[in-house]
Amino acid sequence: MNKYFNVMAFPAGPICNLDCDYCYYLNKTELYPEENNFQMTEEILEKYIKQYIESQPGPMVNFGWQGGEPTLRGLDFFKKAVKLQKKHAPEGWKIENSIQTNAVLIDDQWAKFLKKNNFLVGVSLDGPAELHNKYRKDKNGETTHQKVMAGLEKLKKYKVEYNILAVVNEANAKKPEEVYQFFKRIEADFMQFIPIVEQDNEGDIISRSVDSKEYGKFLIGVFNQWLNDLGDIYVQIFEEALSAWAGFGANLCVFSKECGKASVMEYNGDLYSCDHYVESEHRLGNVNEIDILEMMDSKQQQKFGRAKREQLNPKCLECRYLFFCHGGCPKNRIINTGDEYKLNYLCEGYKLFFDYIEPFMRKLAQMVQQRKSPILMRKEMQKLYREKWDVCRNDSCPCGSGKKYKKCCL
């Protein structure tokens, strides 16, 4: 049985209070042309919570709330959700919640609730104002950085646990040091960097998409900065890489061998195979008609999951990093190489990044197994960095910041 899976719930459907240029989800309203409400009912909410808890092996169950913008469903809805979780959770089980938000609506009341109920809050933020505002605007075309930062300050005021999700595009990809240091200044200790890859109706790459090589260079730039903060700041893709190099495999669906473990439930109870495949052909059913576990264990979902492993481009099969990458996310397999299956658009950038971090990851994996302290790990990584670049304290830092090494990545 396919019991180890996650469901992200979209309580306000694809509706959002922002109008980010690269958002791939706003147009999902087209799946429901006669709908104008897009609000999950309490009846659907309870069915979802009950079925999802029953589908999990326990004793820990994590609920993920996303969108669109989930806070549009209102604070009372989430208060009800917490009550229903307590109602349906078996004795001794622990319920955790995470919510991905643009933070614009986060005020004192929201922050108090999130803290009281131990929500992990993911804040969508693309860097400092000039980078964030380029593509993240509201419905009136106004910039949003100031509003997001105001919401973030509320989270910090009430000591709500939060992390940062940044979409890497053609603009901020060129400034990895600036982006990372900004997040560090706002006290973010967990960061995700998600590449944006968009195609137009003719299949051409839209200009705001990140270039594959630029994405690799961006990750390298962030990695060089992060080496000084190892153990204090966590970057998702670096954690995934370390897990893979240590022999445990990646946990993130992008780098897993198969798909199908991360589904999406829309506002009306419809369950879809993945948030990047919220399309009619990937609809698994509805919680009013079929149990979540039955849908996730269906032949349709199993076939969807296997396709990632079975439909690899020949270049992937020959690649030394297949153990980690596994061909990347299927949605980005768009490069025609003349073979039966297409290659991931980000392949070149991934290889650039993997080549760079490999000696670091091999050493880190060894030190993790030896249970070395973060301080010793940092010192060893800095030593490797110096050896790699043959750099002295007063030389220009190889990371490209323009600063001296002693003032930068030392």
Image: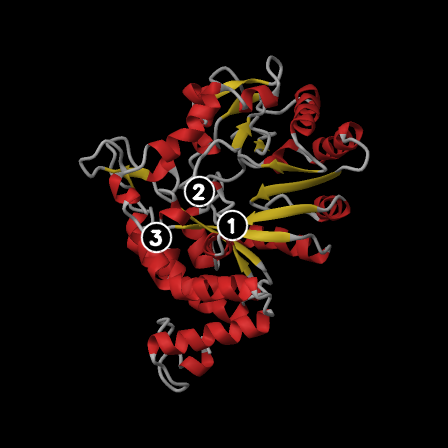
Where disc 1 sits, the SS reads loop
Please name which of the two marks, 1 or 2, marks the residue nearer to the observer: 1
Instruction: From the top left corner, tell me how far across and down residue 305 is, in percent.
Output: 44, 30
Amino acid beneath label 2: Val
Image quadrant where residue 50 sits: top right
- Indicate the position of residue 232 as horizontal and vertical percent values: 59, 65
Instruction: Give the residue number, with chain letter if any, for mark 2.
Output: 254
Visible in this render: residue 402?
A: no
Residue 248 badge: 1
1 and 2 marks in contact (CB < 8 Å): no
Q: Nearer the viewer, residue 367 or 21?
A: 367
Label 1, label 2: how far apart the Cα atoms are: 15 Å
Q: Is residue 126 above or below residue 359?
A: above
SS type, badge 2: helix
For the N terminus, the image quarter is: top right
* Disc on the earlier residue, 1 or 2: 1
In depth, the one of 232 and 375 nearer the eye is 375
Q: CA distance from mark 3 to mark 2?
A: 12 Å
Q: Nearer the viewer, residue 226 or 160?
A: 226
Foreground: 262 or 179? Answer: 262
In the picture shown, does residue 370 fall above or below 323? below
Mark 3 or mark 2, earlier in chain: 2
Q: Which structural element holds mark 3?
A: helix
Looking at the rendered structure, the kind of residue marked 1 is: Phe
- Viewer-nearest of labels 1 and 3? 1
Q: Is residue 40 above or below residue 107?
A: above
- Which residue is labeled 3 in the image? 350
Amino acid of disc 3: Tyr
Taking the image as shown, residue 102 lies to the left or right of residue 391, namely: right
How many numbered tags mark residues here?
3
